[in-house]
Image (cartoon, grey):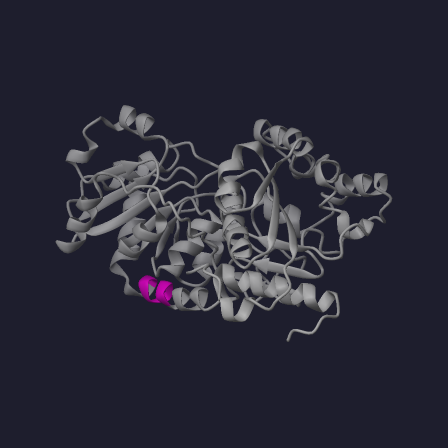
Amino acid sequence: MSAQPDTKSTRDKPKRKFLLHTFYATGHVLPMQAVAQALVQRGHEVVWLASPDQQAQVEASGARFVATEEVVKADTVLKTTEPTTLEGCAEVLFGGRLAAQVADLRAAALYDLGEVPFFATLGVVPLYLPDAGGHAPTSALGTLLSQHRWTLPVINPQREALGLKPLSESDVVQYSAQLHIQASCPSLEYHQPMPQTHYVGPLVSQLTQAPDLPEWWDDVLAAVSSGRRIIGITQGTFAMDPTSLLIPAIEALQDDPSLLLVVPSPHETAIRAKLGTNLQDANVRIAPWVPYGQLLPLCSALVTNGGYGSVTQALAAGVPLVCAGTSEDKKDTAARVRHVGAGVDLGTDRPGLESMRVGVRAVLEDATYKQNAVRMQEELRAQGGARRACEVLEEAIARSRGESDG
């Protein structure tokens, strides 16, 4: 997708000031990077509040970076604590976070406090509503976000301290009532009804200086030309222990001469220490970063722990999936892949070797998975991407101010 400005349609539109705020995880930052870049290219002023670790990603979009301070403390608790109950998850995820956001930039509660005229939310995890229409979430995160009896006891005291009225269990807590933008498409979200929601498909920034391709990239092109099938193996940006998925997947598939495994991972040293240093003599290629935009169109399947961004990008390239992840929102993302028939779910964070082989063979040999992935490709690409996200933002702000769209 392209984020280049359409000068004919944007030259006469008023220029706005946008304030962005993101959770620290890279999988949340990268989709916002695409929106920020597109807003900047359309002539808007963009300020982005983010974790200090994400300064390079923010500045690459053209936005002005502002570092979080209080939110960093809440993020530290989240990174270092492993709760075992839903009540504990609610406290770790939301305890002090609203107050920290307000203290940092008075952003999360600014609309309720009357300090900004308009705010929107961007969804880069599954859409979670109180009534999921028979598709209730099975993950702890999804349960917390769709059933508020655990989260409101944590959130409402923070709202009270800000002088705000308490929320009830019937309120949609995590989404703006004015505009919610979901980086997906209706079919993947069970066509859940939420009037203020606009789907835009996966959000991918078009950076002017993309990372160099790995030195072995010609091996991938040669493999495609010779009829070998490319299998991407990825573990996302949050749950990244290579022993859970990357290493089992490589062990399961590396001896199949009909495949070439491409593994984007910053843990190359650990993988080689576990599996040996001569992986390139087999059918494995590893690099810290491989551009998805060039890898995915060549893949016959993507093995993934089920991050929402990886899944939607793969489907937007028509690639069927083998999902193996249960942390965070990954159970619910895998359920969506099953729902649209575009892949299989191994149902575990640590798949066995035979289970992995069976899953990959299933998506390679049953043409239905590829057909359904292509069907999803058409729907996701039709949503409009970062450009459409900008358009709905501009349109919604104009409506909120009673301005003419002309």
Number of callouts: 0
406 with respect to 116 (left or right):
left
Q: Is residue 90 above or below residue 344?
A: above
Q: Tell me where the magenta segment starts and ends, as one range.
A: 369-374
267 with respect to 45 (left or right):
left
- Residue at the left extreme? 226
- Tell me residue 127's x, y (percent): 58, 56
Q: Nearer the viewer, residue 59 or 110?
A: 59
- Tell me residue 225's x, y (percent): 15, 55
**Dominant SS type (magenta):** helix
Instruction: Place residue 81 in its image quadrant.
Output: top right
334 with respect to 177 (left or right):
left
- Tell me residue 310's x, y (percent): 42, 49
Q: Nearer the viewer, residue 262 or 246?
A: 262
Q: Is residue 82 above or below residue 252?
A: above
Whether residue 83 is visible here, answered yes or no, is: no
Query: What residue is rendered at 40% in x and 37% in y?
Result: 350
- Tell me residue 243's x, y (percent): 37, 31
Query: What residue is rendered at 58% in x and 53% in y?
Result: 123
Instruction: Place residue 381 in its image quadrant.
Output: bottom left
Q: Is residue 139 magenta?
A: no
Q: Is residue 390 above or below residue 37?
A: below
